[in-house]
């Protein structure tokens, strides 16, 4: 398999070079910020970094960040909500065998989700509408040196829209489609003198939809709106201050549960707010932020009519950070510090909540240096970070609990190399540590659960840790872009819950983790431009293929088997992009391989194989005049039955159309 991908890549390299001799096309250097915390050309970054660009987002009909990542094939998406593209709990993403938290919690996370470089109050990517996204940067592999805890699989940084072109510009639009879906939106951007701003707002709704083989799935509707604002002011040449705010809300979100245990009327109201203030110069950056996520669920706690029980959850994040870049004779050093705080509060109108309220503060200091050698053709990177955590379990309404505090600290390291063989061809390598800090409940809980059993934390827990080595080849011209990365991760000290029979309590311990190994080939080639046509025809492919994903803990192997659950052998996105002056189109096929999963219908352990599927979308837009754009989309083009999570069938063929006026 690895040999096959290399052969394909080398053949296409040769084809591209041959065409490049006859065509002179300017190539703009792509700049990224997440991999090193400063703006740098993607070619100079050793970590495996992929970008969903602003152009990709404008030409997509995705509704949120989860849709965008799944469409691009940059992460394995697991959608556990019926209301794809709308309702909450719809955006679990897996990178290199590690996932974001199923419930959207920021704590207990193995893939870090950021908004503009700082924590947000949820990891549910369906809560980030595309209207406010400028681009998404995805760094795969270890990045704990720069970001601290929860970076075992990588970092997803959602970068919001900022200033646009000079002058004042406005856009209004509307969309409608299958399942009584509709959306209205408007945006305003300004960039005059030293002041710039961006404002957007939208409102949307969707009714119940049909799934192939099941008919109409009741209780799958939602309503929502969102507002985003960002403004900035430049002074003294290179000083810039900014203020950003985003608001997202959905209400009457149907929560029907799995198809075998359907609930006709459970629903939720969810709201997210984020605000941040930033100040930056060429070599200095400082910021502070605050985020809040509220979830009010109305349920009977069992399938069937009734939703009289209210369950309230509120997560807050806040923090601040500074960093300074020191240019040193062609080399550079980035150093900084950050403080982050996460608060969780929960209560139920009847009975005790599922877990106690808790919070933690983390304080981190980091530095990473880059040495530029051989006339900037060889780049060596070394980084180090120290983190200190204060964990606290708090008194909780309607719960018998012993409040408790526990502290924790950790040091991480990483290094990387970039060798520029030619202007277009690069070799890259990266080795680094990553970790997930034990949560306040895992370290310091002491409470009785809803069944009357005591749950007690373990203050002697070690963090979950990984050591990842990756390396590969990267090639880019205006016509051909491709790469091939091999990665190997040793994951250890996994934190697991177990019943301590002699003590009669549920508690936590560290166990051996897993070995995860694979390859990540990606390629795109503009056949149309290379052939001299006046149309861009660009086939593309983006694949993650696991050569090994085996569990190391003997108890886990005896219970669940030796293969990681919920992990496909391979997954990817394939298709072709078409672009001309007035129109564009995209045919995208998303493939998800077979997975071994726990059957939730069964009490106890029953591992089953969830089958693979390929879902195909067709999307396009047309500009009859300069300022008017008409868009159409057909999702699930071939009307296949498929599901990302077992017993959560996704919609049948879905049609969508929209109009946008820009002035």
Image (cartoon, rainbow, N blue to C red):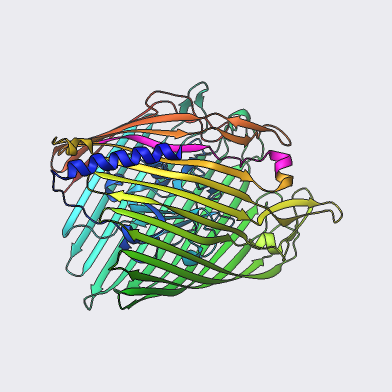
Position of residue 551 relative to residue 403, above or below, is above
Which is nearer the eye, 502 or 527?
Answer: 527
Give x and y (percent) for residue 660: 23, 41
Q: Based on the displayed image, in which of its 4 quarters is residue 163 positioned?
A: bottom left
Q: In this view, does 200 lie to the left or right of 17?
A: right
Position of residue 535 relative to residue 280, above or below, is above
Give x and y (percent) for residue 133: 34, 52
**Residue 271 part of the magenta segment:** no
Q: Which residue is drawn at 60% across and 54% down?
A: 491
Q: Based on the displayed image, in which of its 4 quarters is residue 381 positioned?
A: bottom left
Asked if one can make out residue 92 in the rendered structure from this viewpoint, the answer is no
Q: Is residue 543 left or right of residue 559?
A: left
Q: Which residue lies furthest to the right in this view?
A: 502
Which is nearer the eye, 40 or 579?
Answer: 40
Give the magenta part as a residue range: 557-577
Asked if one can make out residue 652 in the rendered structure from this viewpoint, the answer is yes
Give x and y (percent) for residue 325: 36, 75
Q: Which residue is drawn at 19% across and 35% down?
A: 528
Q: What count of labels does the image hold?
A: 0
Q: Based on the displayed image, in which of its 4 quarters is residue 49 positioned?
A: bottom left
Q: Residue at x 59, y 56 (%)?
A: 108
Q: Residue at x 71, y 68 (%)?
A: 404
Give x and y (percent) for residue 153: 51, 53
**Residue 558 part of the magenta segment:** yes
Which is nearer the eye, 447 or 251?
Answer: 447
Q: In this view, does 355 lie to the left or right of 501?
A: left
């Amino acid at each position: 398999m690895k040999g096959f991908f290399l052969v394909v890549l080398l053949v296409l390299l040769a084809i591209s070079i041959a065409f490049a001799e006859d065509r002179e096309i300017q190539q703009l250097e792509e700049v990224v910020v997440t991999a090193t915390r400063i703006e740098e050309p993607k070619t100079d970054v050793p970590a495996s970094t992929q970008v969903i660009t602003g152009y990709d987002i404008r030409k997509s009909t995705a509704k949120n960040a989860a849709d965008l990542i799944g469409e691009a094939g940059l992460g394995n998406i697991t959608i556990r909500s019926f209301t794809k593209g709308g309702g909450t709990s719809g955006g679990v993403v897996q990178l290199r065998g590690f996932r974001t938290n199923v419930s959207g919690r920021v704590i207990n996370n193995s893939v870090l989700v950021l908004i503009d470089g700082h924590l947000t109050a949820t990891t549910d990517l369906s809560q980030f509408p595309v209207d406010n996204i400028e681009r998404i940067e995805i760094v795969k592999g270890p990045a704990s040196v720069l970001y601290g805890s929860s970076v075992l699989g990588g970092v997803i940084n959602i970068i919001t829209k900022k200033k646009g072109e000079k002058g004042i510009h406005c856009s209004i639009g509307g969309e409608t489609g299958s399942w009584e879906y509709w959306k209205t939106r408007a945006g305003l951007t300004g960039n005059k003198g030293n002041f710039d701003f961006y404002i957007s707002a939208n409102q949307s709704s969707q009714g119940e939809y049909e799934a192939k083989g099941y008919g109409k799935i009741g209780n799958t509707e939602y309503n929502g709106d969102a507002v985003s604002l960002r403004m900035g002011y430049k002074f003294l040449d290179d000083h810039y201050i900014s203020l950003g705010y985003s608001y997202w809300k959905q209400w009457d979100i149907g929560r029907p549960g799995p198809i075998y245990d359907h609930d006709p009327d459970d629903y939720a109201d969810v709201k997210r707010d984020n605000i941040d203030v930033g100040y930056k110069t060429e070599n200095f950056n400082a910021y502070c932020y605050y985020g809040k996520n509220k979830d009010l669920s109305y349920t009977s706690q069992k399938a069937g009519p009734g939703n009289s029980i209210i369950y309230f959850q509120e997560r807050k994040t806040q923090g601040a950070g500074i960093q300074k870049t020191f240019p040193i004779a062609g080399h550079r050093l980035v150093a900084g510090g950050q403080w982050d705080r996460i608060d969780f509060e929960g209560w139920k109108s009847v009975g005790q909540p599922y877990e106690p309220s808790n919070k933690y503060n983390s304080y981190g200091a980091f530095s990473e240096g880059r040495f530029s050698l051989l006339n900037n053709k060889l780049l060596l990177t070394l980084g180090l970070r120290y983190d200190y955590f204060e964990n606290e379990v708090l008194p909780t309404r309607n719960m018998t609990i012993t409040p408790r505090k526990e502290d924790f600290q950790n040091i991480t390291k990483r290094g990387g190399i970039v060798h520029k063989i030619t202007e277009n061809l690069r070799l890259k390598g990266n080795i680094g540590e990553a970790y997930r800090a034990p949560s306040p409940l895992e370290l310091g809980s002491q409470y009785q659960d809803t069944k009357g059993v005591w749950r007690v934390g373990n203050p002697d827990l070690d963090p979950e840790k990984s050591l990842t080595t990756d390396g590969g080849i990267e090639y880019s011209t205006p016509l051909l872009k491709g790469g091939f990365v091999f990665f190997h991760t040793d994951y250890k000290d996994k934190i697991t819950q177990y019943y301590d029979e002699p003590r009669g309590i549920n508690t936590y311990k560290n166990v051996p983790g897993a070995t995860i190994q694979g390859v990540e080939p990606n390629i795109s080639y503009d056949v149309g431009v290379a052939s001299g046509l006046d149309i861009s025809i660009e086939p593309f492919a983006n694949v993650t293929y696991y050569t090994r994903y085996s569990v190391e803990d003997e108890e886990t192997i005896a219970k669940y088997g030796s293969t990681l659950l919920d992990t496909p052998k391979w997954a990817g996105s394939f298709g072709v992009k078409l672009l001309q002056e007035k129109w564009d189109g995209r045919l995208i096929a998303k493939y998800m391989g077979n997975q071994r999963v726990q059957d939730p219908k069964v009490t106890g352990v029953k591992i089953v194989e969830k089958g693979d599927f390929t879902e195909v979308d067709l999307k396009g837009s047309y500009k009859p005049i300069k300022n008017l754009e008409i868009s159409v989309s057909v999702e699930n083009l071939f009307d296949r039955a498929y599901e990302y999570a077992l017993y959560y069938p996704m919609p049948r063929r879905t049609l969508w159309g929209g109009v946008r006026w820009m002035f």
